[in-house]
Image (cartoon, rainbow, N blue to C red):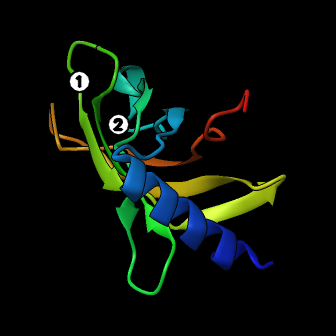
Amino acid sequence: MSYNKNQQEENYREEKEGQTHVHEFLGSTRLAERGEERHNHRFAGVTSEVIPLPGGGHKHAILTNTDFFDHLHEVGVETGPAIPVGNGKHVHFVEGETTIDDGHFHEFVFATLIESPLL
């Protein structure tokens, strides 16, 4: 059975049951600004439930704030599609930019954690 077929069956089962899975995530932004103001931020949270993709598969939405360094930024982005990591599990690749605050923004690149790691 291909991963896509497994994923379609999972999506059907989750839609029928009414709830879908989420992923934990954590990351750090890339450095921004110069000199003494050069800094980065950390962030963590849990994604939205599944957002189905046309033709099968899914993605998730992420909306959170960074930590505070005399200011903070918002992280609002959608993940890429599921990336299989074995045993029917998957992660999602995420990249983007924070909101502009204090005259600058930060770029970020990370992967979500595996969904339901104990199952």
Residue 42 higher or lower than 17, as above or below: above
Mark 2 falls on what kind of element?
A: loop
Residue 72 is labelled as 1
Picture coordinates of residue 71 (x, y %)? 20, 19
Residue at the spot 46% in from the left edge and 37% down from the top edge: 29
Between 105 and 44, which is closer to the camera in this rendering? 44
Residue at the spot 46% in from the left edge and 66% down from the top edge: 58
Between 50 and 94, which is closer to the camera in this rendering? 50
Q: Quadrant of residue 41?
A: top left
Q: Quadrant of the N terminus?
A: bottom right
Which residue is labeled 2 in the image?
Answer: 33
Residue 2 higher or lower than 37, as above or below: below
Residue at the spot 63% in from the left edge and 34% down from the top edge: 116
Mark 1 falls on what kind of element?
A: loop
Residue 19 higher or lower than 86, as above or below: above
Q: Would residue 22 be found to the left or right of residue 67 on screen?
A: right
Chain-order first, disc 1 or disc 2: 2
Picture coordinates of residue 80 (x, y %)? 49, 65
